[in-house]
Image (cartoon, rainbow, N blue to C red):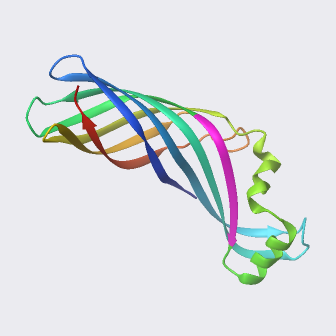
């Protein structure tokens, strides 16, 4: 079973009003996505020890992401809104870690693999460097002086697998919670 994570997402956005209910929002984000897989490790190939116990593979991927979103909002002073759109992301780095429940198995792995982050390079040539997703979310926006504060939750549904070596359901789909400060021109 894989558990998906978003560690960090930060960036900037610009919004354009099409009318008092609809707008277009363009974003430029740095985002860290990834997942962990818990499994029982049976290693006869490298160590000859056989059963090594429970382990967790941690994968972390850094992206530059560009979401293009339609924003539907109410014209009220405190304005709830919904967003929907598409996102394209470019992979800029990937890291791997392996954590064993038992210290003996961990030290065995660490002794065999000098730099676990480089371990991903064994299959890293097949990582998809472009990721495409669908974004949907809700939020609320309220004015403070000449600024606009927004709080938002969104779900990005990844359409492409992280790697061609992994099953198709290993995508960068994730919930995220964001806050922002805007200034109207």
Principal secondary structure, stretch drawn in magenta:
strand
Residue 80, percent across and down? 17, 38
Who's the residue at 40% across and 34% down the image?
135
Left or right of 149 in this view: 49: right
Numbered-mark total: 0
Residue 36 in the figure: left or right of residue 86 = right
Q: Furthest-left residue in view?
A: 76
Quarter occupied by residue 76: top left
Q: Residue at x 90, y 66 (%)?
A: 46
Q: Is residue 5 left or right of residue 148?
A: right
Q: Residue 36, relative to residue 27: is it above or below?
A: below
156 and 19: which is toward the camera: 19
Image position, residue 82 (x, y; %) = 25, 34
Where residue 85 sits: x, y (%)?
38, 27
Quick check: is 98 in the magenta stretch?
yes
Above-or-below relation of 55 to 160: below
State left or right for residue 103 relative to residue 80.
right
* Res 160 visible: no
What range of the chain is rendered magenta?
A: 90-99
Residue in view at x 8 percent, y 36 percent:
77
For residue 57, what is the image quadrant? bottom right
Task: Tell me the quarter of the image containing the N terminus.
Answer: bottom right
Residue placed most toward the observer, 74 or 28? 28
Question: Residue 33 at x, y = what percent?
Answer: 54, 49
Q: Which residue is located at x 80 percent, y 71 percent?
A: 110
């Amino acid at each position: 079973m894989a558990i998906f994570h978003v560690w960090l997402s930060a960036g900037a956005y610009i919004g354009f009003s099409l009318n008092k209910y609809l707008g277009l929002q363009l974003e430029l984000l740095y985002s860290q996505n990834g997942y962990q897989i818990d499994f029982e490790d049976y290693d006869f190939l490298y160590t000859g020890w056989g059963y090594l116990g429970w382990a967790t593979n941690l994968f972390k991927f850094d992206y530059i992401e560009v979401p293009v979103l339609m924003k539907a909002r109410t014209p009220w002073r405190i304005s709830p809104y919904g967003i929907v759109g598409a996102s394209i992301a470019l992979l800029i780095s990937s890291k791997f870690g392996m954590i064993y429940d038992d210290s003996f198995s961990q030290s065995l792995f660490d002794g065999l693999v000098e730099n676990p982050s480089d371990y991903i390079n064994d299959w890293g040539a097949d990582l998809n460097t472009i990721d495409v997703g669908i974004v949907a979310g809700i939020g609320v926006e309220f004015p403070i002086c000449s600024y606009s504060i927004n709080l938002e939750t969104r779900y990005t549904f990844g359409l492409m697998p992280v790697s061609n070596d992994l099953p198709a359901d290993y995508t960068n789909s994730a919930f995220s919670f964001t806050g922002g400060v805007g200034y109207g021109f």
